[in-house]
Image (spheres, rainbow, N blue to C red):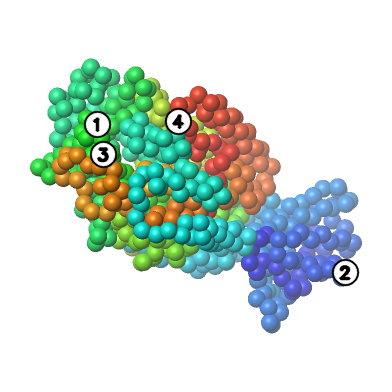
Amino acid sequence: MDRKGAGTDSSVICVLLNDAGQSSNQIVLDAFLKNDFERGKTDEFQITSSFLEQVDTIEVWQEYEPFSTNEWFVEVIKVFCEPSNKTFVFPFLRWIKGNCHYKIRHLDTSLPKDDPNKEQRRMELNKEKENYQMEVKIPGLPAKEVTEDEKFSFDYQFDIVRLSAELTVKSKIVHMTTGRWEDFDDISNIYVEEIFTKPSPLVKKIWDTDEHFGFQRLGRLNNTLITLCTEIPSKLAVTDEMLLPFLEGETVQDVIAQKKLFYVDLELQDGIPTRPEYKVCAPIALFYHNDQEASLVPIAIQLKQQPADDNPVFLPSDPPYTWLFAKMWYNNADTCYHQAITHLGFTHLLMEGCVLATHRNLSHSHPIFKLLAPHFIYLVAINGFALETLIKPGGSVDKFMAAGTVGVFELIKRKLAVWRMDEDGTLPVELEKRGVLDDNVLIGYHYREDALPLYDAIKHFVTKYVGLYYDNSETYVGDHEIQAWAQELVKPRSQGGCGLLGVPGDGSITNESDLAVILTSIIFTVSVGHAAANFAQYDEYGFPPNYPTLIEGTPPVDKTPLTEASIIDALPDKSTTFDVMTIFKVLSGMGTNKLGDYEVKYVYDPKAEAVLEEFRKELEDLSNRVESLERFRKVSYPWLNPDIIPNSISI
């Protein structure tokens, strides 16, 4: 296992046992003239002192060494018994401390009631509670110092640091100039293939079009806000006459009845604190699904919530650069929502609480722990990395986001007060809530088109897996570990819990349906949800006018005709642009294996392995489906192809 300090130089001893009461003598595992038990290595030993045909339990310990760390990480031990020609597998996945004896069962998968080593199980969980303590480090969300079990592998951590440093150095060498940009072409000329490739909106020359602006709501980073409009919001100061030129000859009521009118309302960020020199809007935008172009286009943007003389409704018929600037201010607000809520708050930080609750309450032997663990790899580590670099006071968020860390944290708190797992965290319900579950509504909604089959596949997999270990409601109620886990998910953060609202069962799990919804929500969020929010970042942020994190000055208060020069003057300077591009280039990298192809194997139970294999086959079919769809899509949306969705949040 590629973990720092995972090897040992201590003497390792084991005893083999079976359920018939037979056991071997103590066996010292030591290969002659070989340095055994090095980090990331597999060692083999020939044992002649055992006569057992079957091994049900292995007991392992390492002798205490006074000048050693006395910790050794063991992934798995396999015992081949020659008399029976059978192999017995003991998944440890634990740190072995000096002079501590560990007994692990064959396949190591059991509910608490079925575990013969109940005392060891209890002691290990108590230790996990010490290692994974809920501590509020970010206002409103739990976080914890990174423990040894959660640190990056040596190689993976090196890759992140190396890539960041390499991009930073190269960008400074190649682009020695400083100061302001001259025009949009000046910005578009900075891309050098070996450092920064051109983002696709720039390559296709569509970044400033209404069609691209509409598609950003459907197939880019913030895909979960577009909502069917059943009536014009009263605070949006539009009239039927104002909108008529953009509705292809139909009336507002006609397009509402035909489900072709949509809106996004960023009311949640109204009045959030920002960096002193910057503003963040709380816009409302109206979109029409254009029949002629078969695309979503904006038809009205109001940059502040309440109508006022200095808060006009911007329209596609306004002077071109005035309309473009209104779209850019909207996107500047959208970047704030995306980074604070869609990305950081409700994938990274929300799921960290679920990681902690899982480690604190579910034994490594618990089947649900084994289901979730592959989806938690590096999540706590990357959050720790972000705390140290990106979202600390004075860090990257304070430098390159208009809201800064204070505004970002405020947005997270606001959303957490209303976010519900059974609605916002359950994709079909969330889509239905926005009126866009029906695939005949909002044609071209690629996020829905790709995410919904993935949600169904994950839920099908999870439901079959859960059914292997739980027979009836009594099995759930009698599982004190899963009950403690569920209780900690809903327990208020002030009392050391995750404080999640809308968790099915509200802290008590009595049936397969509730448990499956919870597990599906978690696995979907750390894989599909994060992929949708993360991996198109460079494509969007890599050309600042397309999706600006910073706009200097104040939002427009009237429809005075603007020029390209006036917009360029409001964009970040060259040095800031390179730094923003570097950050999002690094964050758009894909680190861990694809969904279902686990970096670390936790599941060894043959029944569970069969269910996992079915899941992998279904993902393969969905990958082929996305590739087929991509051939006919007017605008590409590759981000939810299962072949490139990682198992976990690792970047």
**Where does label 2 land, which residue?**
32
Is label 3 in a helix, a strand or a loop? helix
Q: Which of marks 3 and 2 is nearer the N terminus?
A: 2
Cα distance between the residues tagged 3 and 2: 77 Å
**Where does label 3 land, which residue?**
321
Q: Quadrant of the N terminus?
A: bottom right
Do the residues under discs 3 and 1 have CB atoms within 8 angstroms? Answer: no
Q: Residues within 10 Å of mark 1 (few under 14, many from 20)?
A: many
Q: Position of residue 244 (x, y in %)?
A: 19, 23
Query: Does residue 360 appear in the picture of this structure?
Result: no
Q: Which of marks 3 and 1 is nearer the N terminus?
A: 1
Q: Nearer the viewer, mark 3 or mark 4?
A: 3
Q: What residue type is labelled 3?
A: Tyr
Q: Residues within 10 Å of mark 2 (few under 14, many from 20)?
A: few
Cα distance between the residues tagged 3 and 1: 10 Å
Q: Which of marks 3 and 4 is nearer the N terminus?
A: 3
Is label 2 in a helix, a strand or a loop? loop
| Rendered image quadrant of residue 409 | bottom left
Q: What residue type is labelled 2?
A: Phe
Q: Where is residue 163 in the image (x, y as percent from the top left)?
A: 55, 57
Q: Residues within 10 Å of mark 3 (few under 14, many from 20)?
A: some
Q: Which of marks 2 and 1 is nearer the N terminus?
A: 2
Cα distance between the residues tagged 2 and 4: 62 Å
Residue drawn where x is 48% and y is 47% of the image: 191
Cα distance between the residues tagged 4 and 1: 22 Å
Q: Earlier in the sequence, mark 2 or mark 4?
A: 2
